[in-house]
Image (cartoon, helix red, strand yellow):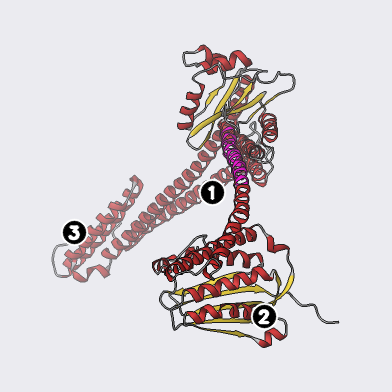
């Protein structure tokens, strides 16, 4: 049987079940209406019997009133009034009478009452001497009471018959209602069983399937061949939702797999160590993970860091090296696509080439590779497109999903970043090469300064000194002053050369290999003694203070190069002496702070402007106030000090207030002493 006929049969069965349930419900409603009708009829009959009984009781009461009106008790108001009362009672009783027998009985009683009242009236008139009509043959109380009793008996008999009828009707009604209720109850039970079997159980099965689906059993499905059509429709919707959930989970798993694939491919594509080998591996992982036949990338033809790689499924020839070069507009198209954040996606490349929208690049791609489906994503670096990432399928057309296109765009973005990194690495290597060349030139220049300038300066200084001492004859005062200027500038030039050589030696790491104990207390005393003459000539007070306790326990002893440390401390003391006006003070202190030895040089000199303190350790830096005072110096002293101290794992701290003075602190680590014995 075909699927259509089966579906029709199932739908027909569902309709039959629904019709059967509706028929059962109709019969049940009819029975309930019958119960209601029987009860209503019983109530109507009961009401009718009650009304008839009330009428008969009223008729008996009216008969009694008629007897009382005709008796002596009714003559208290006079015979005329008594006759009126009799007539009224007779009229009331006659109004309540129903049927000829009751009316005849009432009329008989009323006639006897009138006769009795008339007889009493005749007796009273004879007593007064008035003529009296004779009473009827039956006039008298006995006849009246007999007629009354006959009426009462007839009323009682009718009342008894009425009660019997009422009991019979009630019994019949109760019997009918009971039978109908029993039938309705049985029908209800049958209907409940049918509803349970045809509706509740299928719905319970659907609810169980929903619970299993919610608990994670995604393979469960509801039965669609049980219950009425409405229940089957619910089951079909539940199955449809479960299928949709399976599709959503499959799409989520596919998206997660593509994200993991993009992460792995991006990691390989961004490898800066071996970019070409990593790119080839990235294309292999991309091709196998995305299920394509070929993947290739070409970046920046003519660029010194251009990357080219391709991958093909086993059995396919490699991608032609010159693929895409015959399409002259390819570069412009890639740039336009990069600017528009777009890509070329062809589910059926042959159909695309046959259309009017094809380009030289797509035709070249089809002719050179035979691909049936392709995606081309531009690769960019900054604002320029530098190449393209291409994947193709050859077995037939393929519908590319949005997730797959997003994956390729992510890989293209990683390739763009890899290109930037490769260029930066290339530029860095070029820069390192240039720096090496400059370093060689610097070394050569310093060697030239050392050998070619110091030797002539030594000769000049020697001959100037010889001339000033009269070695070539007596020198006049004017000539002596000129020779003094030459001598002073020769010294400055020699100091500059020595500073350059010292800075070069320090930056080349010369002091790092020296690990000898250096007593900072003695070093500071020697440096202060060296500068006392200059301080005295400038009218300064130069004092020194060494923490003797720290010196005794070895807390002021460091490991390093004594000559370079002496030069650093001497540079700080020399600057303090040079930039402190006459009458000022320079204090040099050596003490211990925690696990460090500290040399502190404090002066009351001209200070340094706050805005210029950030460039203190820059080569050839000179503060503006020092330049304005025309104080000599090349601006290399603090640069040399910092280089020396940093090579000894220390640090230099300088604080200054313009016009008040400067404090320079050299902090050096003290080696940890091993415990004795």
Which of discs 1 and 3 lies nearer the camera? The answer is 1
Q: Is residue 228 visible?
A: no
- SS for dot 1: helix
Please state the extent of the stretch shown in magenta in the rendering: 408-437
Q: Quick check: 154 above or below 264?
A: below
Q: Residue at x 65, y 41 (%)?
A: 272
- SS for dot 3: loop
| Residue indicated by mark 2 | 522
- Would residue 639 appear left or right of 6 to someone viewing this image? left
Residue 547 image point, x, y percent: 64, 86
Please say whether residue 72 is one of the residues in the magenta stretch.
no
Please say whether residue 415 is one of the residues in the magenta stretch.
yes
Numbered label attached to residue 174? 1
| Residue indicated by mark 3 | 133
Numbered label attached to residue 609? none
Q: Residue at x 72, y 81 (%)?
A: 554
- SS for dot 2: helix
Q: Quick check: 339 above or below 113?
A: above
């Amino acid at each position: 049987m075909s699927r259509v006929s089966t579906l029709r049969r199932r739908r027909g069965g569902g309709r039959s079940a629904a019709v059967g349930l509706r028929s059962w419900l109709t019969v049940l409603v009819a029975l309930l209406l019958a119960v209601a009708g029987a009860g209503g009829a019983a109530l109507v009959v009961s009401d009718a019997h009650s009304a008839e009984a009330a009428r008969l009781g009223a008729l008996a009461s009216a008969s009694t009133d008629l007897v009382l009106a005709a008796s002596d008790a009714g003559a208290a108001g006079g015979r005329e009034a008594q006759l009126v009362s009799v007539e009224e009672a007779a009229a009331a009783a006659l109004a309540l009478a129903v049927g000829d027998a009751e009316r005849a009985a009432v009329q008989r009683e009323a006639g006897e009452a009138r006769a009795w009242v008339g007889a009493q009236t005749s007796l009273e008139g004879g007593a007064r001497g008035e003529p009296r009509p004779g009473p009827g043959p039956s006039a008298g109380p006995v006849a009246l009471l007999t007629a009354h009793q006959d009426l009462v008996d007839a009323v009682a008999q009718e009342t008894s018959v009425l009660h019997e009828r009422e009991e019979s009707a009630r019994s019949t009604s109760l019997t009918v209602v009971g039978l109908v209720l029993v039938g309705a109850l049985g029908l209800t039970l049958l209907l409940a069983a049918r509803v349970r079997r045809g509706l509740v159980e299928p719905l319970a099965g659907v609810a169980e399937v929903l619970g299993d689906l919610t608990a994670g059993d995604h393979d469960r499905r509801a039965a669609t061949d049980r219950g009425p059509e409405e229940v089957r429709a619910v089951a079909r919707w539940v199955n449809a939702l479960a299928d949709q959930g399976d599709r959503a989970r499959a799409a989520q798993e596919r998206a997660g797999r593509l994200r993991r694939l993009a992460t792995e491919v991006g990691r390989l594509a961004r490898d800066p160590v071996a970019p070409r080998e990593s790119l080839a591996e990235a294309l292999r992982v991309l091709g196998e993970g995305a299920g394509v036949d070929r993947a290739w990338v070409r970046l920046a033809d003519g660029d010194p860091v251009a990357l080219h790689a391709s991958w093909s499924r086993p059995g396919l020839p490699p991608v032609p090296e010159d693929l895409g070069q015959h399409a002259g507009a390819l570069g412009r198209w890639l740039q336009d696509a990069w600017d528009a954040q777009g890509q070329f996606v062809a589910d059926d490349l042959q159909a695309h080439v046959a259309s009017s929208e094809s380009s030289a690049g797509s035709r070249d791609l089809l002719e050179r590779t035979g691909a049936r489906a392709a995606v081309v994503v531009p690769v960019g670096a900054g604002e320029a497109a530098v190449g393209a990432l291409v994947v193709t399928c050859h077995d037939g057309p393929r519908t590319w999903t949005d997730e797959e296109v997003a994956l390729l765009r992510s890989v293209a973005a990683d390739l763009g970043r890899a290109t930037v990194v490769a260029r930066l690495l290339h530029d860095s290597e070029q820069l390192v090469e240039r720096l090496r060349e400059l370093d060689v030139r610097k070394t050569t220049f310093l060697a030239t300064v050392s050998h070619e300038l110091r030797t002539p300066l030594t000769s000049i200084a020697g001959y100037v000194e010889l001339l000033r001492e009269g070695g070539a004859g007596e020198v006049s005062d004017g000539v002596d002053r000129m020779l003094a200027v030459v001598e002073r500038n020769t010294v400055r030039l020699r100091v500059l050369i020595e500073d350059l050589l010292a800075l070069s030696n320090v930056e080349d790491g010369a002091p790092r290999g020296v690990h000898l104990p250096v007593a900072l207390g003695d070093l500071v005393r020697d440096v202060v003694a060296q500068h006392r003459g200059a301080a005295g000539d400038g009218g300064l007070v130069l004092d020194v203070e060494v923490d003797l306790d720290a010196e005794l326990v070895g807390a002021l002893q460091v490991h390093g190069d004594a000559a370079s440390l002496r030069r650093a401390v001497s540079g700080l003391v020399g600057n303090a002496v040079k930039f402190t006006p006459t009458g000022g003070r320079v204090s040099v202190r050596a003490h211990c702070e925690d696990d460090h030895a500290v040399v502190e040089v404090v002066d009351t000199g001209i200070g340094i402007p706050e805005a210029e303190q950030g460039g203190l350790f820059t080569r050839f830096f000179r503060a503006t106030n020092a330049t304005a005072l025309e104080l000599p110096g090349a601006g290399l002293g603090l640069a040399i000090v910092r280089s020396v101290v940093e090579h000894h794992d220390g640090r230099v701290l300088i604080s200054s207030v313009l016009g008040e003075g400067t404090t320079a602190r050299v902090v050096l680590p003290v080696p940890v002493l091993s415990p004795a014995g």
